[in-house]
Structure formats: structure tokens, C-alpha cells
């Protein structure tokens, strides 16, 4: 028998083999139909999620743009605050130098005097503790010297 389109003989063995291969393929697909159905369901769910995400993408882009704008404004504010702080520091530099040059030495002297006063008060407290009569009668007179 000839193939009407090509005038070549029909190959029945090739046709039989093709039918056998199709039968194996059909059995394999039928055996894995549950897995294929689950994969198709997962693909459909992924497509729905992708469509949902894609529909929300413009709003997300707007939020990112607003956040970037807010960050730019904040950066400008921080830079302005830094400039203001630098100006304030420059304005107070003379006062700080005067404080450091004049007031700190006086404070150091005051601290030294307070330490001396504390030591003196500690000695008085020790004497009163040893002899409470000192509060009423004062210090005892020193013993007369050799020529007195």
C-alpha cells in the first residue's frame, strides 16, 4: 500500500510501534495523574498569587517612593540640625574657652579648699570623739614649759 501524499509505502510495523508507545505513555500518565493534578493545582495557585502580587505592585512602588521621599526629607533635616549644632558650637566656643581659662582654675582651688576644710572638720570630729568636754571647755591648756 502507498501513502497517498508521498507515494511511499506505508509502514505498518512503524504504526504498530507508535501505537504501543502511545499505550505506555497513556498508562504512565494515568498512573501519575494524582501527582500531575497536584502540580497543576499548585501551578494555578502560584499563578493566582502572582496575579495578586502583580495587582498590588503599583501600590508597593508608591509606598517605596513615599518612603524614599521621607528619607530624603529626614536626611535634609539631620543635615540642617548638624549645621545648626556646628553654628551653636562656634557661637559658644568663646564662652567655653573663657570658662575653661577662668572658671576651671577657680573650681580647682575651691575643691582644694574643700578638701582642706574636710580634713580640718575630720580632726575636730576626732578630738570631740576622744574628749567630748572639748565642746564645753575648749582645748585643754598645754602643759607649762620648762621655764614657765
Image (spheres, rainbow, N blue to C red):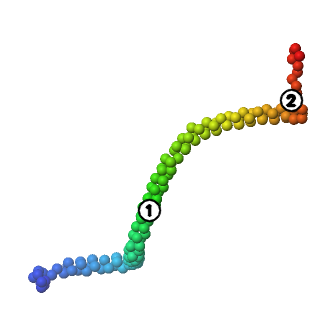
Horizontal side of 75 relative to 140 (left or right) equals left
Mark 2–mark 1 Cα distance, whole angstroms, equals 76 Å
Q: In which quarter of the image is the C terminus?
A: top right
Q: Residues within 10 Å of mark 2 (few under 14, many from 20)?
A: few
Picture residue at 51% right of the left edge, 44% below the top: 93
Query: Which residue lies most toward the top here?
Result: 147
Q: Residues within 10 Å of mark 1 (few under 14, many from 20)?
A: few
Picture residue at 31% right of the left edge, 77% below the top: 25
Q: Quadrant of the N terminus?
A: bottom left
- Residue 142 numbered mark, or none: none
**Secondary structure under badge 2?**
loop
Picture residue at 23% right of the left edge, 77% below the top: 17
- Residue 139 numbered mark, or none: 2
Picture residue at 45% right of the left edge, 55% below the top: 79
Residue 105, percent from left and from top:
61, 36
Residue 124, percent from left and from top:
81, 33
Residue 62, percent from left and from top:
40, 70
The image quarter in which residue 7 lies? bottom left
User: Which of the pair 66/45 is nearer the observer?
Assistant: 66
Q: Is residue 32 visible?
A: no
The image quarter in which residue 3 lies? bottom left
User: Which of the pair 104/18 is nearer the observer?
Assistant: 104
Horizontal side of 129 relative to 78 (left or right) equals right
| Total numbered labels placed on residues in the image | 2
Sequence-earlier tag: 2 or 1: 1
- Residue 73 numbered mark, or none: 1
Residue 130 drawn above or below residue 45: above
Amino acid at each position: 500500500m502507498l501513502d497517498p501524499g508521498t507515494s511511499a509505502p506505508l509502514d505498518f510495523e512503524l504504526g504498530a510501534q507508535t501505537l504501543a508507545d502511545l499505550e505506555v505513555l497513556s498508562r504512565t500518565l494515568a498512573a501519575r495523574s494524582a501527582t500531575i493534578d497536584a502540580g497543576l493545582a499548585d501551578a494555578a495557585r502560584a499563578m493566582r498569587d502572582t496575579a495578586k502580587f502583580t495587582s498590588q505592585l503599583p501600590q508597593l512602588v508608591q509606598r517605596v517612593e513615599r518612603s524614599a521621599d521621607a528619607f530624603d526629607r529626614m536626611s535634609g533635616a539631620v543635615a540642617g540640625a548638624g549645621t545648626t549644632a556646628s553654628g551653636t558650637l562656634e557661637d559658644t566656643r568663646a564662652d567655653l574657652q573663657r570658662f575653661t581659662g577662668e572658671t576651671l582654675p577657680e573650681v580647682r582651688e575651691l575643691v582644694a579648699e574643700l578638701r582642706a576644710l574636710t580634713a580640718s572638720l575630720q580632726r575636730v570630729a576626732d578630738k570631740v570623739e576622744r574628749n567630748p568636754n572639748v565642746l564645753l571647755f575648749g582645748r585643754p591648756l598645754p602643759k607649762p614649759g620648762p621655764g614657765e
